[in-house]
Image (tube, grey):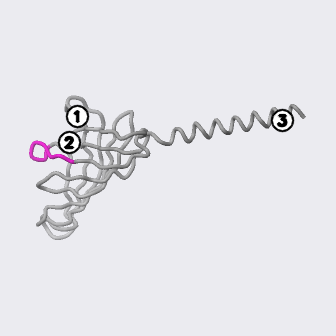
Amino acid sequence: MRKTLFVGALAALLVAGALTISFAGTRAVVRPMRVAVREHALTDTVINTGKKGDSSGDLLTFHNPIFDATNSHKVGHDQGDCIRISPKAGTWECRWLTYIAGHGAIMVEGAFFDGRNSTLAVTGGTQQFRNARGSMKLVSRHGGKQYDFIFNLLP
C-alpha cells in the first residue's frame, strides 16, 4: 500500500513538474521590449501581374540581410512579399518574417508606403518571439536602400 501511494505521488509530482516547465516556456516575451535592426534592401523584385508598368496587383518579393541597429554586424535576414494596392497613392500591403540569428523570427503585416514611413502589426513569432504581438515602425533610410525596423513587442 505504501509503495503504491509513493509511486502515485511521484508520478503526480513528475507530471506537475513537466506541466510547469511546459507552460513556463510558452511565454518568451514576458515584458514590453524594443528590438531595432536595419534591413539592406538588395533583392527587392517587382513582378508585373497584369497591365505593363506599375499597376494594382503587382507583386514585390524580397529576402534581404538584416544588420544590428548600428548597421555594423549582420544579425539575420528577412523574407516576404507585398501586393501593390494603389500606384497613385503609393501603397502596398505587405507581410514578412525578420529572422534574428539565435533568437527567432518576428512576423509583421501591414501597409508599406512608397514615400513615407509606416507602422505594421506584429502578428507573431518563433523561438524567443513566439508569443510576440505589438507593432513595428518602418523608417526609410538612404532613399529606400535601407530600412530601420523598430519592433515594439508586447507579451
The span shown in magenta is 138-145
Residue closest to the eye, 57 or 8 = 8
Residue type, mark 1 in image: Ala
Residue with the mark numbered 2 = 148
- Label 1: state its secondary structure: loop
Q: CA distance from mark 2 to mark 1?
A: 8 Å
Q: Residue at x 39, y 46 (%)?
A: 132
**Is the N terminus in the top left, top right, bottom left or bottom right quadrant?**
top right
Callout in the foreground (2, 3): 3
Residue 125 location (% of width, % of height): 39, 46
Residue 26 location (% of width, % of height): 50, 42
Question: Which circle's residue, 2 or 1, is located before the other in the chain?
Answer: 1
Residue with the mark numbered 1 = 69
Residue type, mark 2 in image: Asp
Mark number, residue 5:
3
Mark 1 surroundings within 10 Å by alpha-carbon count, few (fewer than 14), some (14 through 19), many (20 or more) = some
Question: Which circle's residue, 2 or 3, is located before the other in the chain?
Answer: 3
Q: Is residue 139 above or below residue 93?
A: above
Residue type, mark 3 in image: Leu
Please identify the quarter of the rendering in which residue 127 is found. Answer: top left
Residue 151 location (% of width, % of height): 29, 43
Q: Residue at x 30, y 55 (%)?
A: 109
Residue furthest to the front: 31
Mark 2 surroundings within 10 Å by alpha-carbon count, few (fewer than 14), some (14 through 19), many (20 or more) = many
